[in-house]
Image: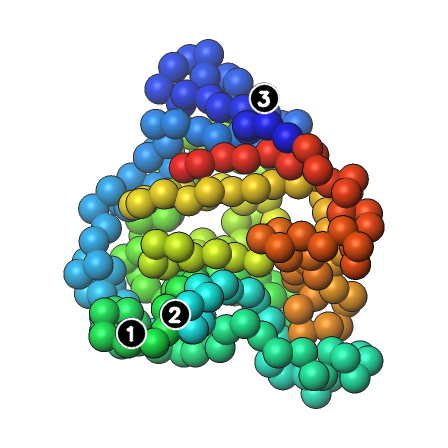
Amino acid sequence: GGALQRADLATTSGRAAALAAVRRREPVVLSHAWELLPGAKQWTVRRLQEHFEASRSPCDVLRAPQERQKYTYYFENLADRDMLEEGRRAEPCNKALRLSFTDFVRLTRDDERHRYYLQTSLFACDRGVQGLRQAQVPNAELKGQLDEAMEGALWRELSEALGHFDWFRSQLFVGPVGTLGCAHFDQYDNFFLQVRGSKRFLLFDPRVGARCLYPFPVHHPFDQRARVDLESPDVSQFPRLAEAYGAGAEALL
């Protein structure tokens, strides 16, 4: 594989290169990207706690054993899913919880047996009556920061490059050192802003992922992720995985 292309938004040439990559739907790492969400510069644990407590909205949190720290999305309600018995017996590597931000902070600090990974919406749109899109806003102030950012020049240029997209969701992720996500796919064009700490990405072309990483079938509880464990790859069980070697791209933010 190799490293992802990079572009510096602080320079005219870098901005042009970034927009060209976006038009081609190619992954690109952007430096000097605070213009995506300037208000995030001021985020601290205490400030976010104030935001969430004011809205009284619970957060989506994944809990994993301390010794593993591996996380995955999964669907807990299987009543409407037509699947093999294998799917009904599937054991997730973590448990999904709904917690206040204050409880998340407390458990992260005090629970020595588990690790907690917060993945919750700051703003989301759901289809309402007659197909109309209705905003679900857990916190009006955070939504205001997003609205203000999207009125800026960078977001206007990005929207034009993407063909004037509809914004669907803005999410916040907070996790401890060592947090590991199972190989999975995201359903939408994504802009990821690293606010604090660092994050390592390993990306594959969707065509490579669909063939070589053996995604779980539709309706399986894990149907947003791969069967392959990239930490312990088993080519004997998943022979097409060998074709993925050298096909990924890495980025460290």
**Mark 1 Cα shell of 10 Å, populated few (<14), some (14-19), many (≥20):** few
- The residue where tag 3 is placed is 20
Query: Element under label 3?
Result: helix
Q: Estimate the spatial distance between the alpha carbons at disc 3 and disc 2, rounded to whole Å.
A: 42 Å
The tag on residue 66 is: 2
- Comparing labels 3 and 2, the label whose residue is closer to the camera: 2
In this rendering, position of residue 224 left or right of residue 151: right
Q: Residue at x 51, y 64 (%)?
A: 71
**Looking at this view, is 123 or 127 the one in front?**
123
Q: Residue at x 60, y 41 (%)?
A: 203
* Image x and y of residue 212, in percent: 77, 48
Q: Estimate the spatial distance between the alpha carbons at disc 3 and disc 1, rounded to whole Å.
A: 47 Å
Determine whether label 2 and label 1 are within 8 Å by CB: yes
Name which of mark 3 and mark 1 comes first in the sequence.
3
* Image x and y of residue 47, in percent: 19, 58
| In the image, farthest residue toward the bottom | 79
- The residue where tag 1 is placed is 112
Query: Element under label 1?
Result: loop
Residue 59 is drawn in which quadrant? bottom left
Amino acid, disc 2: Gln
| In the image, farthest residue toward the front | 236
Name which of mark 3 and mark 2 comes first in the sequence.
3
Q: Residue at x 66, y 62 (%)?
A: 224
**Looking at this view, is 90 or 169 the one in front?**
90
**Mark 2 Cα shell of 10 Å, populated few (<14), some (14-19), many (≥20):** few
